Image: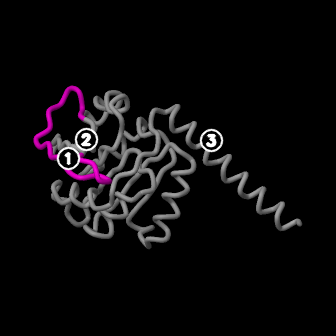
Amino acid sequence: MIYLDVSFLLLALFVFVWSISGIIALACGAPAVYADSRLIGEIFKLAKIKKEQIVLDLGCGDARSLIIAAKNYGAQGIGFEVSPFAYLKSKLNVLFSGHTKNVKIYFGDARKAKNEIKKADIIYLYLFDKILREIEPMVFSAARPGTIICSLGFQFKNHKPYLSKPLQNCKRITKVYFYKV
């Protein structure tokens, strides 16, 4: 009987944390939406990612993009996540992938990542229009010349991509926009 009560409490706690995480993410304008791993690999191939480059994911979700960058390309990864549940999941995914030395995840709002933007060689984004409009001035002013910005599904308002490529994401065609600072 006590075992059942503890199991129920753990399940209830999990559901509560997951729900609060969703509310926080929605309030910040960044609900969890994940990209297909194969698509992320194609994006990095088109971005010509190289070994030891720094890949920044503002809104990294489960850290899939950063793990792919580290595992397949030898890159260093930095991610920001505002959802507590996704942040915990990303930390666990990085731990279980064996890339804790190459990938760092920070809990916090991507709009406060100016110092990390300055370090990035490649910035990977899967953010809605509203957030892109908010971070566009910061990203383009803080990023170093030559930084590649890959935006999945949504375009920046005031900058023109040098490449726009339709790719398959979870059985749907989604455009990916590539910018160079």
Report the amino acid beneath label 1. Thr
Q: Percent position (x, y) of residue 22?
A: 55, 41
**In-front residue for pair 127/38:** 38
What is the distance, in whole Å, between disc 2 and disc 3 at their CAs?
A: 33 Å
Residue at the spot 24% in from the left edge and 52% down from the top edge: 168
Query: What crowding class fits label 2: few (fewer than 14 Cα within 10 Å), some (14-19), or many (20 or more)?
Result: many
Q: Is residue 24 left or right of residue 125?
A: right
Report the amino acid beneath label 2. Ala
Query: What crowding class fits label 1: few (fewer than 14 Cα within 10 Å), some (14-19), or many (20 or more)?
Result: many
Residue at the spot 26% in from the left edge and 57% down from the top edge: 39
Q: Contact, CB < 8 Å: mark 2 with mark 1? A: yes
- The disc placed on residue 143 is 2
> Where does label 3 land, which residue?
20
Report the residue that reaches farthest toward the right: 1
Q: Percent position (x, y) of residue 16?
A: 68, 46
Q: Contact, CB < 8 Å: mark 1 with mark 3? A: no
Q: Nearer the viewer, mark 1 or mark 3?
A: 3
Q: Percent position (x, y) of residue 94?
A: 46, 65
Q: Secondary structure at mark 3?
A: helix
Q: Is residue 25 left or right of residue 116?
A: right
> Where does label 1 land, which residue?
147
Report the amino acid beneath label 3. Ile
What is the distance, in whole Å, between disc 2 and disc 1 at their CAs?
A: 6 Å
What is the distance, in whole Å, between disc 1 and disc 3 at their CAs?
A: 35 Å
For the N terminus, the image quarter is: bottom right
Residue at the spot 32% in from the left edge and 28% down from the top edge: 133
First-in-chain label (1 vs 3): 3
Numbered range of the magenta stretch: 155-173
Query: What crowding class fits label 3: few (fewer than 14 Cα within 10 Å), some (14-19), or many (20 or more)?
Result: some
Res 132 quadrant in image: top left
**In-front residue for pair 134/21:** 21
Colouring style: one colour
